[in-house]
Image (cartoon, rainbow, N blue to C red):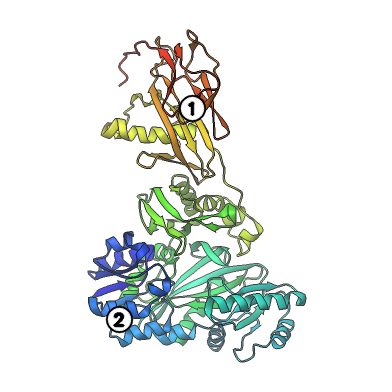
Amino acid sequence: MKLLVANRGEIARRVFRTAKDLGWSTIACYATPDAEAAFVQEADGAFHIGGADLADSYLNQDKILDACARHGVTAIHPGYGFLSENATFARRVIDAGITWVGPHPDAIASMGSKIDARAIAEAAGVPLIPGFGDAEQQGDDRLAAEAERIGYPILVKAAAGGGGKGIRIAHSPADFAGALSEARTEASRSFGDDAVIVERYIERPRHVEVQIIGDQNGTVLELGTRDCSIQRRYQKLMEEAPAPNLPVTTDRGLRDAALKLGRAMGYDNAGTVEFVVDAETGDYFFLEVNTRLQVEHPVTEAVTGLDLVELQLWAATGNPLPIGQDDITIEGHAIEVRINAEDPANDYAPQTGRVEILEVPDHREGVRWDGAFDGRGEISPYYDSMIAKLIVSSSDREGALAKLRSVLDQSLIGPLKTNMGLHRWLADQTDVVEATMTTRFLDENPPPNPPLNLDGRDIAGALVHEAAETDAGPWGRLPGFRSTLHDRRFDTILRDSEGELHEFVASATSADRVGVYDDETGVVCVNTDGHTLSYQVVDRSEAWAPDSGSAGGAAGDVAAPFPAVVVEIPVSSGDHVAGGDTVIVVEAMKMLHSLTAPGPGDVDEVRVAVGDAVEQNQTLVTFVTAPLSTGDDQ
């Protein structure tokens, strides 16, 4: 089979991995901004479909199908988003004689409207949130009357689409008209359809879902629950399987209800039945069916041992599923966090730009990294901001949370801002630890701002990490090997993300910090409480200093790290200084910067005066030099 993934980024790479394991040939389609992306390079073949505009590329059905005909594509996997839940596209794929890796078009169409979906769920005996949805009765007065009947607070939400768009809450009749108008406007803009439904708003809602898988021979299976309650703007950030802290009757009821609905739909591929669970009572209500593979599918794979993409491909080609319901067991616990290029401290504002440093300990057992790239890469402004999904698994939930903390504490992604620190903070929150979180958690508990400043030990750790790799080479990787790196001192000027300059003078005595310096780009990244703090090196000098008990002078002169003005000279020719003593103070960018002696010794010459303008790398102070200690450091 020759499989096209009509998608991009990490989901394309994910599908390619399984397809290649099965011996399928893989094809990528890409828009201009993705020409150099990892998923394009990893496919067996690739074709260009248009520019950055989605209508010209990933949403252009004609271009995709025409290219499939030219390249002999025999199957299409839509991933998630884009055309994955477009019933018209699914029908066109099938009509073209190409295998559609997803549920049949009628199933997709039946869930395309929340009004229709409610009716199908009700007919299948699945509990519904008290509400009203009728495409023919959308008048303001009728909807307001239904809201009064249901009782406030009321949720007004778009009948079409998803992703948290077109949703508003009305806490009283006085709020209803405004909420209705805003929901309709957003629904029309996002989905081209301003129809809405009104339903009771659950005060303490949990978002719990059930994974189902079916085949074309009438088999439908459920693969357990997932909790996706940690959300911002109705979009998921953290997911886990199985859903924790559920009453046994709720867990069993959710799974049975999902099976009922899947069978009523004649469901024949991977899908997810989503529910709202009342955290107070354990009551559950149908929300929607996502007729595609979910972003969070890896947590289900981790606790079942199944490959959901493999099952998708198996079912799409007409084969009966190779497992039965009795073969499915749920073992252990798994948690996924979505690593997004966004700034939680700035209302989750999306970030764009380059990732120059990416280090994640995904070699550890029970750690999985599904990323758009594994090293350097770029997040463009044209698509969503997700960089990757980090998945951890353990024998129990406590172990999974501990592993998540550990991995986040050892990971670095920069200089682009991400929400990695937010996830590290979440992993310590009582509601998360005790599994009492609701979908309102982040609204009610805004995360703290990340730390802004580093200290010299952080920088020393990052620079020593790089120096150890550079200077010690393979010897530095031998157990018990110790080089003279403990004597290295660093005099570093860094620029932060706000453009401010910071000076760090430190001896490398604290090299256990998690940090990296990339010599090619001059970026320093340091992990602080799970946050990657990124700085740009403006100037960096280094010297070998003698041990504190050794005789001798300094190992270098002091030069200007950048253009500046001399504002203070606290030393004179002949003065004895210790390593780290200030010898010159300069001003640049309205900030004062202290330049220090690189080691103990005697001042030879001061070559500037207060008020002098100096250039970058200009020598300012020289020292009387003497031999360094010649002891055997190795």
Tell me if residue 396 comes above or below residue 262 in the rendering. above
Q: Disc 2 to disc 1, how far (Cα)?
A: 62 Å
Badge 1 amino acid: Val
User: Which residue was labeled with disc 2?
Assistant: 99
Horizontal side, residue 298 vs residue 230: left or right: left
Tell me if residue 231 comes above or below residue 625 in the rendering. below
User: Which residue was labeled with disc 1?
Assistant: 505
Name of the residue lying farthest toward the top: 574
Q: How many marks?
A: 2
- The quadrant of the picture occupied by the C terminus is top left
> Is 433 or 572 nearer to us in this picture?
572
* Residue 520 in the image, given as x and y percentages of width and height: 35, 41
Which picture quadrant has residue 170? bottom right
> Is 274 or 40 nearer to us in this picture?
40
Which picture quadrant has residue 142? bottom right
Question: Dot 2: few (<14), some (14–19), or many (≥20) neighbours within 10 Å?
Answer: many
Determine the secondary structure under disc 2: strand
> Is 507 or 381 nearer to us in this picture?
381
Question: Dot 1: few (<14), some (14–19), or many (≥20) neighbours within 10 Å?
Answer: many
Badge 2 amino acid: Thr
Name of the residue lying farthest toward the right: 174
Determine the secondary structure under disc 1: strand
Ranked by sequence position, the earlier of labels 2 and 1 is 2
Does residue 119 appear in this view? yes
* Residue 253 in the image, given as x and y percentages of width and height: 54, 76
